[in-house]
Amino acid sequence: MRPVIPYVTAALLFGLGVYGVLRRRNAVLVLMAVELMLNAVNLVLVTADTTVRAVLPHSGQVFALFVIVLAAAEIGVGLAIVLQLYRLRADVAVDEVPLTERDEFPRPAGPPHAAAVAAGPDPEAGR
């Protein structure tokens, strides 16, 4: 088998993933583009394993399994962030996400420890 075809396919997949990350506004589509890039890396690893026999047998396939595990973890965390963003803003456009805490969560009025002063002294403080 000629390794040029899988390498070119992986390069096209990776380029499509980079384009999706840079151009998409929807957070779910950005996560899908990241998955495309990870799959392109997996294709390169498996192709390199089949064409170049290194000192370690099947090392490319083992690394591909690690990438798959990392991709699953990334999707779990990414979708949790997207769901929380949708709950807060009812939109998943990544270019409209506030980058500072002040814009999204305004601080309550009054002194910084007004709730602690109103509650009284801490009974555990003297012990």
Image (cartoon, grey):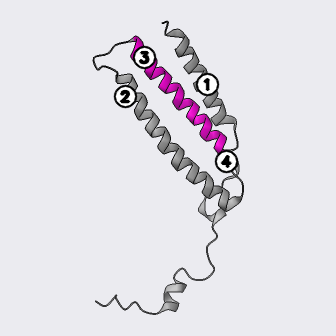
Evaluate if marks 4 and 2 touch, with contact meaning CB atoms under 8 Å apart.
Answer: no
What segment carries the magenta color?
27-51
Q: Is residue 54 above or below residue 69?
A: above
Q: Amino acid at mark 4?
A: Val
- Please tell me whether mark 3 sits on a helix, a strand or a loop: helix
Name the mark on residue 62. Answer: 2
Q: Is residue 74 above or below residue 121?
A: above
Quarter of image, res 123: bottom left
Q: CA distance from mark 4 to mark 2?
A: 34 Å
- Please tell me whether mark 4 sits on a helix, a strand or a loop: helix
* Residue 22 percent location from the top left of the image: 65, 35
Q: Earlier in the sequence, mark 4 or mark 1?
A: 1
Majority secondary structure of magenta residues: helix
- Please tell me whether mark 2 sits on a helix, a strand or a loop: helix
Q: Earlier in the sequence, mark 2 or mark 3?
A: 3
Q: Please give the name of the residue rendered at 57% of the width and 53% of the height, measured from the top-left corner.
A: 81
Q: Looking at this view, is 14 or 51 the one in front?
A: 51
